[in-house]
């Protein structure tokens, strides 16, 4: 083997995965066809769950001062996110290029090898390994690895070469996103409909404006390069009457509304994460966020299998847990697309939904959906409300030191939270001490006991999801074995 894992693509999914693997000490090579970052920023900001995920690896400070906001939308209809049970709200300002820059630096600090200017050409796999052909600056070469993960975006070569099934629907229209300098236009919130379509205009700095253009009746096109700015400017003028033709486009993107998802996230030793596994209309700022979370679900599992501490079957839970999340993403972005791309005929549904969002239960339901907080992985029926859900942030005291459920996850290891000073449970967990940190803690104040719903101990997976709670039928040893492999002693 040349390395344990090859990750194809240094976008948000690939970088997050490489970081998670390195945290667990696994050798990884990232091959990325671009010789330097594109600087493009399709995605803007983080959902609440991504804020938490970055926080649980201690990564938030690397982004500098981060503003958050409760102002969001569902299909262009205002949605206030306040009242969610998280320590964060959503961020709307970090450019995807900055996210990639921060993640890349983190990954390099952790010792991963990123080969820029290296493009995957093809792959084959057998029972023991995956072999790939790569075109690098010095010519073509082959690499052999135990596992390969395709994080190579919506047009994934890995997906095609390995033969993943990718059913769905083709694009029915074309939309534009353009970051333009040197023009003054009226600011318009996302969701503002005008005769003929939908437009958005928001200034990213004093001079740089981000424009989104969705024109009814636009036909999808097979483009080989970026859409000419004249075409974008003409569409803007048709919809708004404003002339932006004298502006300088910093970056433009033409995209469609095709919806597809692979039927399996894994084929033997080849796995997919991020856009390579699911594509959808960018609605509500979720694609990059879900891609990062795919990798956080996969990273620790793949690391455990590669290191031989857990059986290969643990990797199957990556598909069973993340495929439904991808399905839900496709469903909610489709629904949002109907709301914001639809014409006059959709207005009654918009009006009814605006009335419904006035109800707190509806508002919170939609807020959790677009924030990634509604995810519950199926871990069987052991009754506790947090089982399968992410552990919310709770401030804790360990001996005399303040900590939190978030901070305890920084090393990317499992955490057994012992809030009842339970020596028997600690002894049961001791044979997994090489993989799981048992910490005896006291919740910092009484009000935080609510999220614990009566249990005094929790097993938290490296991805922050609760895998076991005391008081149920399953023993802690059984849960530890299920998620972390057989006891080592
Ligand atoms: C207009 C638009 C706006 C968006 N806005 C948002 C938003 O606000 N919020 C949000 O969360 N999401 C948004 N998204 C979605 C988001 O950009 C994607 O979901 C995200 O980039 C997916 O990350 P990824 O790492 O899976 O793939 P990508 O970011 O596509 O990265 C794939 C990488 O693989 C590399 N690669 C491809 N093929 C090969 C190969 N053969 N060999 C080696 N390397 C290869 C590519 O060069 C690239 O660097 C938006 C998308 C669009 C189109």
Image (cartoon, rainbow, N blue to C red):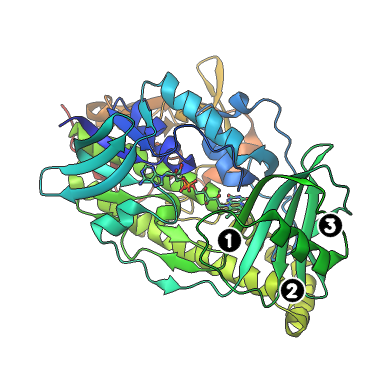
In the image, residue 272 lies at what x, y percent?
34, 51
Q: Residue at x 25, y 30 (%)?
A: 432
Dot placed on the residue nearer the N-terminal end, 3 or 2? 3
When the figure is inspected, residue 392 is found, relative to residue 218, above or below; the finding is above
Left or right of 353? Residue 474 is left
Q: Is mark 1 within 8 Å of ligand 1?
A: yes
Q: Are marks 2 and 1 in contact (CB under 8 Å)?
A: no
Which one is in front, 221 or 145?
221
Per the model, the C-alpha gap separating discs 2 and 1 is: 27 Å
Per the model, the C-alpha gap separating discs 3 and 1 is: 20 Å
Kindly report which numbered mark, 3 or 2, lies closer to the viewer in this rendering.
Answer: 3
Which residue is disc 1 drawn over?
Answer: 255
Which one is in front, 66 or 280?
280
Q: Is residue 8 something one can see in this rendering? A: yes
Extreme residue toward the left, this view: 127
Q: Residue at x 61, y 38 (%)?
A: 448
Q: Are marks 3 and 1 in contact (CB under 8 Å)?
A: no
Name the quarter where the C terminus is drawn: top left
Report the disc number at residue 353: 2
Q: Please, what secondary structure does the residue beneath circle 3 have? A: strand
Q: Is mark 2 within 8 Å of ligand 1?
A: no
In the image, residue 262 lies at what x, y percent?
36, 63
Which residue is disc 3 drawn over?
Answer: 188
Which one is in front, 324 or 46?
46
Q: Is residue 377 something one can see in this rendering? A: no
Dot placed on the residue nearer the N-terminal end, 2 or 1? 1
Q: Would you identify the image quadrant in which residue 107 lies?
A: top left
Q: Residue at x 49, y 55 (%)?
A: 375
Is disc 3 surrounded by few (<14), some (14 to 19) or many (20+) residues within 10 Å? Answer: some
When the figure is inspected, residue 129 is found, relative to residue 331, above or below; the finding is above
């Amino acid at each position: 083997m040349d390395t344990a894992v090859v990750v194809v693509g240094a976008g948000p999914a690939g970088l997050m995965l490489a970081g998670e693997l390195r945290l667990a000490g696994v050798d990884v090579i990232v091959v990325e066809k671009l010789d330097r970052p594109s600087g493009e920023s399709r995605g803007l900001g983080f959902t609440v769950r991504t804020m938490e995920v970055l926080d649980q690896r201690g990564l938030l400070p690397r982004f500098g001062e981060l503003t958050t906001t409760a102002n969001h939308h569902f299909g262009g209809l205002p949605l206030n996110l306040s009242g969610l049970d998280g320590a964060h709200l959503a961020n709307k300002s970090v450019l995807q290029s900055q996210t990639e820059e921060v993640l890349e630096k983190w990954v390099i600090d952790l010792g991963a090898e990123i080969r820029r200017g290296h493009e995957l050409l093809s792959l084959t796999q057998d029972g023991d390994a995956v072999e790939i052909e790569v075109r690098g600056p010095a010519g073509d070469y082959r690499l052999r690895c135990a596992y390969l993960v395709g994080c190579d975006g919506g047009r994934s070569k890995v997906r095609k070469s390995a033969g993943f099934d990718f059913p769905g629907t083709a694009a029915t229209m074309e939309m534009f996103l353009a970051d333009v300098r040197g023009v003054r236009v009226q600011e318009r919130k996302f969701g503002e409909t005008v005769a003929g379509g939908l437009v958005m205009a928001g200034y990213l700095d004093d001079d740089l404006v981000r424009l989104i253009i969705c024109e009814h009746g636009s036909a999808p096109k097979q483009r080989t390069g970026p859409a000419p700015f004249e075409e974008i400017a003409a569409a803007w003028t048709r919809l708004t009457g404003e002339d932006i033709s004298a502006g300088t486009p910093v970056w433009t993107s033409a995209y469609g509304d095709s919806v597809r998802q692979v039927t399996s996230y894994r084929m033997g030793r080849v796995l997919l994460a991020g856009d390579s596994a699911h594509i959808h209309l960018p609605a509500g700022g979720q694609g990059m966020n879900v891609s990062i979370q795919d990798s956080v679900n996969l990273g620790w599992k793949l690391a455990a299998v590669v290191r031989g501490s857990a059986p290969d079957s643990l990797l199957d839970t990556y598909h069973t847990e993340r495929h439904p999340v991808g399905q839900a993403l496709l469903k909610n972005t489709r629904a949002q697309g109907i709301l914001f791309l639809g014409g006059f005929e959709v207005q009654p549904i918009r009006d009814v939904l605006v009335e419904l969002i006035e109800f707190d239960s509806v508002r919170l339901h939609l807020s959790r959906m677009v924030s990634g907080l509604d995810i519950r992985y199926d871990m069987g029926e052991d009754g506790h409300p947090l089982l399968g859900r992410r552990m919310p942030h709770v401030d804790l005291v360990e001996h005399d030191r303040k900590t939190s459920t978030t901070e305890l996850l920084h090393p990317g290891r499992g955490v057994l939270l012992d809030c009842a000073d339970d020596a028997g449970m600690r002894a049961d967990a001791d044979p997994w001490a090489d993989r799981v940190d048992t910490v005896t803690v006291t919740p910092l104040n009484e009000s935080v006991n609510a999220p614990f719903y009566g249990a005094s101990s929790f097993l938290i997976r490296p991805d922050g999801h609760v895998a076991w709670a005391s008081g149920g039928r399953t023993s802690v040893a059984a849960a530890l074995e299920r998620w972390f492999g057989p006891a080592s002693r």
